[in-house]
Image (cartoon, rainbow, N blue to C red):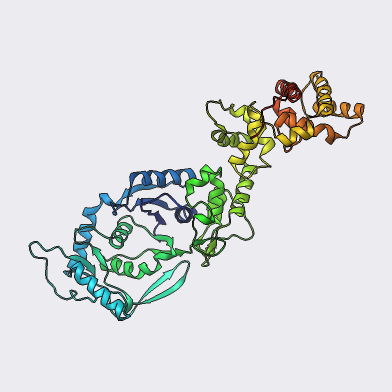
Amino acid sequence: MPPVRTRFAPSPTGFLHLGGGRTALFNWLFARHHGGAFVLRIEDTDRERSEDRFVDAIVDGLAWLGLDYDEGPFFQSRRLEVYAERTEQLLAGGHAYHCYCSADELEAKRAAAQAEGRRLVYDRRCRDLGRSPGPGEKPVVRLRCPTSGETAVDDMVRGHVLFENAELDDLILVRSDGAPTFHLCVVVDDIEMGITHVLRGEDHLTNTPRQIQIYRGLGATPPRFGHLSLIVGADRSRLSKRHGATAVSAYRDLGFLPSAVVNYLARLGWSHGDQEIFTPAELVEAFDIDAVNRAAAAFDMEKFAWVNAQHMKATDDATLAVAVAPYLAVGDAAVPSVEALMPVVALLKERARTLVELAGQARVLVFDDVRYEPQAVAKFLGEAERANIEALRTELAALDRWDHAAVESAFTRIVERSGLKLGKLAQPVRVALTGGTASPGIFEVCVVLGRERTLSRLAATVEGARAGTLPLVT
């Protein structure tokens, strides 16, 4: 058995979307699991719609996901001579023919078939003319499909699928302007690149029997095919923007970790017992095509965010600090070092589902431009509360060390001395330090802010609340 060789072959007519990302992932996982090769091919023969920016976006998206390719990227637009040679081979072998029907004639035939309720297929008028183009003639080249019997597809996902050859059309391989079509290019490329397994969307299943005929006409053995179910929304309709972002790059902007995106995409249509959370290495070890489901995979944004949260929790603090830093950048404010961010992410990563959420919670601990919630100021920064905060600040300033136990002891002394419950002291202090009523444990907040910033914020808040000059959330 030859070594496994898979490929991902997107058209650069848009950004890498979730369906394409999953197709690339399954091909990559299959190749890596079997110790084979993963090839990237850019199918850019549609020059009107193909754009370099989309090529860059696809390559960048694969790199962000960690889906490294062994060969490529190959561009179909640079391989036209190869397709021309293979076209001549098909013509010489009688597996293709020239069709001289004009566009107007074909349109008239389509209209007549539609009016009569017949299938919209070419009537094979030119199939047996047996002549070459004359001067000035620019015919298309059509595949000579068999008209009887069956073409079998032993699909790795769908099982044994039979197609009646009488239902196959003599599809166009080369247009009248000489441009090769998708069906010819994809088959020639898979032959030339030695592709052994093709995993692609189920919308390509009906293309497969026609492409098998092209393989046979070129004297090649078709690869094994596996057609993957579509990704649908919770309402079972095809995935669209109303179900959530569809471009892979959008999830980077939303603060998802690439390992979490890979994990979630892998579980869309593939299962491995009850395990939900996988590292990329675990996916490579566990993945095989036998566990890919035929049923459509439902996209669930809440589940996706949960998976990301699990990956964030499992990420070491240094790595997570590097990951969150770009989301903290605002204006000209300098983002703290990784070392400074590590205790912040360690404190907050259990509370956030995305890097965006983590950055939002971290800003008040990283930057000193605190904004105060008006209702929290009114409720928790009255005269009595300010007096308690000032008393606490005095206790904190006298500490000979600054850690959780020492900070807690300062709170305890104020509580015991004043007869307050801890919450009656902690909540005003929380508002003073963070501007709001929700944060991690108040002792942990003090430790992460450090002695100088904690004391400074307490003093500034008391002064600002007394003078009515606190900057408020608007």
Quadrant location of the N terminus in the rendered image: bottom left
Residue occupying the point 62% across, 39% down: 358
Q: Nearer the viewer, residue 206 or 243?
A: 243
- Residue 85: image quadrant is bottom left
- Vertically, is 258 above or below 335? below
Q: In this view, does 324 lie to the left or right of 18?
A: right
Query: Where does residue 261 sit, x and y in percent of width and height?
Result: 54, 49
Q: Which of 430 and 175 is in front in this view?
A: 430
**What number of labels is visible?**
0
- Residue 326: image quadrant is top right
Q: Which of 55 and 470 is in front in this view?
A: 470
The answer to whether residue 106 is seen in the rendering is yes
Q: Is residue 67 left or right of residue 365?
A: left
- Vertically, is 111 above or below 1? below
Q: Looking at this rendering, what residue extends furthest in the left direction?
A: 135
The answer to whether residue 66 is seen in the rendering is no
Residue occupying the point 30% across, 63% down: 183
Query: Where does residue 170 sit, x and y in percent of width and height?
Result: 26, 72
Query: Where does residue 366 sit, x and y in percent of width and height?
Result: 64, 29
Q: Nearer the viewer, residue 53 or 340?
A: 53
Q: In this view, does 405 lie to the left or right of 2?
A: right
Query: Where does residue 138 sit, x and y in percent of width and height?
Result: 14, 62
- Vertically, is 447 above or below 271? above
Residue occupying the point 84% across, 22% down: 391
Quadrant location of the C terminus in the rendered image: top right
